[in-house]
Amino acid sequence: MAVKSESKVAKSESKALPVLVLGALCLAAMYGVSSSASSAGDSEEPASEPMVSAMMLAKFMCAFFGSQFLHTYFFTGAAVKGYFTERALTAQEQKIAAYLMKSVGLCQLFVLILSVLTVASGTVSKEYMLTVLTMFTFSVFDVSKMTTTCEAVGIPKSAIYPFVVLCATMAFLSWKALKTIGDSEGFASDSFVSAMALAKFMSAFMGFQFVLVYFFTGASVRLYFTERVLTVQEQKVTVYLLKCLATNQLPVTVISVLTVASGAVSKEYMLTLALWNAFGTCAMSRMTTTCEAVGIPKSMLYLYMVLHATIAFLFYAAWKTM
């Protein structure tokens, strides 16, 4: 049994090593390309050029969050098997894990849409870059903290370590790129609910959701899972994944707050929220078929469906007038 356990850890560590090596090689390659490009350019410009450009980082975010969203949302079963390798989950724990991982995937979709629209526009805003910086900086500490609880729910530490390195690297590169970006220009909106009013609402609503789910996770579990009593192990899996969910909600909160603080609302921000909430409405209608099996009443989701449908409509209406 001990030999099996050791081989399992060794196997998961061997899977993590290529990710770390690949990350280091990518960073070295990007730095090399940027260095050669800057040395070939004007002698006055290199000082202001970041190691990796803001647009290159936005393109990376499209690819990274695109793969994360597809893996977590559309191939949830494979994602559960891929992450929970330390022990076999019970049938009920698998249902809870799959349900919550779809919710995590839904939150990741926001960053994906925003990144794609940013790349398509050809302009990277200061708010976008600062959001990415905040998200990855917070994730460095959050993911590091998760190494103290991951094994208890069945996820090996070796699966977490590459993400710590990735988040730290992205935080550093985002900080370097942020220093080269100027202030963004906003667009006026004459919708019956203004773009700025909607941004303020999202700041308050998503801020409340993040604080509730991340800092008061136990209360969130009791609030949402009212259909049945969870076992101790089921609670551990639920708390762990709810914290992952909250971390992925953070970018929505951060960019909404920054948008309000800047006094300029971008078209990319408005369209992202319209599309994200529209998709969320459809996703939640599907989740009503599985929510009761994990202990969440349908009535809870119906409220969120109405809310997200309303938000999607209001953001779309405001975006059309910009």
Image (cartoon, grey):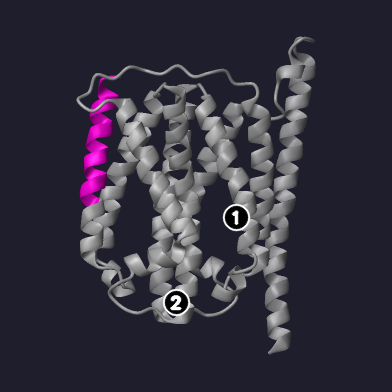
Judge left or right: residue 47 versus residue 201: right
Tell me which secondary structure the magenta stretch mostly adopts. Answer: helix
Residue 58 rendering spot, x and y as whole percentages: 55, 33
Residue 234 rendering spot, x and y as whole percentages: 44, 77
Of the 4 image quadrants, the one containing the C terminus is top left
Q: How many marks?
A: 2
Residue 221 rendering spot, x and y as whole percentages: 39, 67
Element type at mark 2? helix
Residue type highlighted by circle 1: Asp
Of the 4 image quadrants, the one containing the N terminus is bottom right
Q: Is residue 182 above or below residue 106?
A: above
Residue 137 figure quarter: top right
**Is residue 224 covered in magenta?**
no
| Label 2 sits on residue | 234
Please tell me the numbered disc located at residue 142: 1
Residue 194 appears anywhere in the view: yes
Residue type highlighted by circle 2: Glu
Q: Is residue 8 above or below residue 283?
A: below
Judge left or right: residue 95 versus residue 65: left
Please tell me the numbered disc located at residue 186: none
Could you give the CA–CA distance between mark 1 and mark 2, rounded to whole angstroms? Answer: 21 Å
Residue located 37% across and 65% down the image = 99
Q: Is residue 310 above or below residue 151?
A: above
Element type at mark 1? helix
**Is residue 320 covered in magenta?**
yes
Q: Nearer the viewer, residue 263 or 305?
A: 263
The region drawn magenta spans 305-322
Give the crowd class for mark 1: few <14, some 14-19, many >=20 residues within 10 Å.
some
Residue located 44% across and 48% down the image = 249
